[in-house]
Image (cartoon, rainbow, N blue to C red):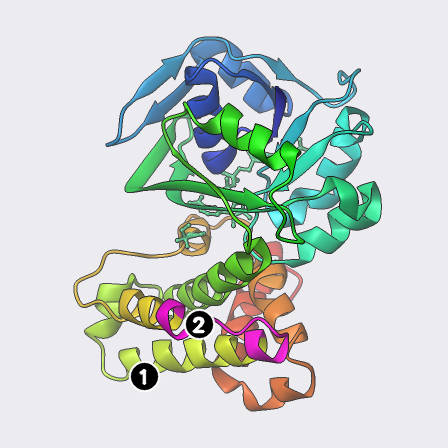
Amino acid sequence: MRILIVGAGATGGYFGGRLLQAGQDVTFLVRAHRSAQLAEHGLVIRSALGNVELPAPRTVQAGGLREPFDLIVVSCKAYHLPQVIEDMAPAVGPDTMIVPLLNGMRHLDVLDGRFGAGHVLGGQCVIAATLDKQGVVHHLNQSHSLTFGERDGSRSGRVERVLAAMSQAKFEPRLSTTILQDMWDKWVFLASLAGITCLMRAPVGDIMAAAGGEAAALQLLEDCRRVAARNQHAPSDAVLARACSVLTEKGSKLSASMMRDLEQGGQIEADHVIGDMLARAGEEAESLAMLRTAYTHLKAYEARRDGSG
Ligand SMILES: NC(=O)C1=CN([C@@H]2O[C@H](COP(=O)(O)OP(=O)(O)OC[C@H]3O[C@@H](n4cnc5c(N)ncnc54)[C@H](OP(=O)(O)O)[C@@H]3O)[C@@H](O)[C@H]2O)C=CC1
Ligand SMILES: CC(C)(CO)C(=O)C(=O)O
């Protein structure tokens, strides 16, 4: 299976690197700076679950794509998606599958609109990873699952082939028959985690140590749950209980990748992760005060960052 990983950043570098390590036919679509880094230093992953150094992984830049790939894994940030879509278009042939790993949901509509829904599977990853200035991928926790599936829930031949291709790689590939619900479940959790850790500029444990911290986190979770329910994707009691316990764990060092980006002064996926959640609340948005505050806070950060205030 010919696999194109779009973006060799934290998630793309990690999962693409693990696939390459397992002997899969992997190419990375990258931009000039990352291309030079990978050519000089190779793809380096530092992980408690096993370091790996892959000298000179195959890369291609926009304009260099000539043929369709079997599988395209999209692992860019949401704010880069419009350009990414144009750059990857020559790699999409009649039988190409696209698996996006972005947090949130709106990218599915964007990808469907450009390539047709038949090409676009559901996808998500659970991992904490970051890229340092030298281009090394740092895996920060013990989770590394990549879940994908047909959005109609079927176990088609093509998703079975993706599972087979991923089965030898050193991460947890999961073929889901409920991928849209899985994506909503993760979004509800992630939007709560990103919203609260960014708002408080602190990981979960420090928020729990602060007066009002637990109530604020749980209120944000409840706001996101209400949006999911309104969109016919209410999380189950078990999913909610798990989200609740992770978001309120005393002493926890957990924070969202958005908080890491924000603390480094970087761009953030405010509209994609929080704004779109609010947009899907419709007229209920007025009553979701924590979610609205989380969004306003991120937009104020963006305004300050890009000097548009
Ligand atoms: N990091 C994490 O722990 C997790 C992240 N996620 C989600 O995964 C998605 C990706 O995040 P993450 O991997 O952290 O992001 P990164 O910023 O680490 O990586 C994204 C990569 O996309 C590349 N890129 C952007 N535009 C293009 C383009 N036109 N052509 C080729 N490459 C391009 C960037 O390259 P360049 O260097 O040129 O800018 C960058 O290396 C996000 O939606 C995030 O929310 C989900 C779970 C965990
Ligand atoms: C939920 C979590 C923390 C892990 O995948 C994540 O997606 C993120 O930090 O962006």
Q: Disc 1, ligand 2: is the CB inside 8 Å?
A: no
Q: Which amino acid, mark 1?
A: Ala
Of residues 190 and 92, the one nearer the viewer is 92
Identity, as a three-letter code, of the amino acid under mark 2: Ser
Q: Is residue 160 visible?
A: yes
Q: Would residue 198 be found to the left or right of residue 96 on screen? A: left
Residue with the mark numbered 2:
236
- Of mark 1 and mark 2, the one earlier in the sequence is 1
Q: Position of residue 287 (x, y in %)?
A: 56, 91
- As drawn, 8 above or below 129: above
Check disc 2 and report its element: helix, strand or loop: loop
Query: Magenta segment, which residues?
Result: 228-239
Q: Nearer the viewer, residue 262 or 23?
A: 23
Label placed on residue 215: 1
Q: Residue at x 69, y 82 (%)?
A: 282
Dots 1, 2 in contact, CB < 8 A: no
The reply to whether the magenta stretch includes residue 170 is no
Q: Residues within 10 Å of mark 1 (few under 14, many from 20)?
A: few
* Residue 294, image x, y percentages: 49, 73
Q: Quadrant of ligand 1?
A: top right
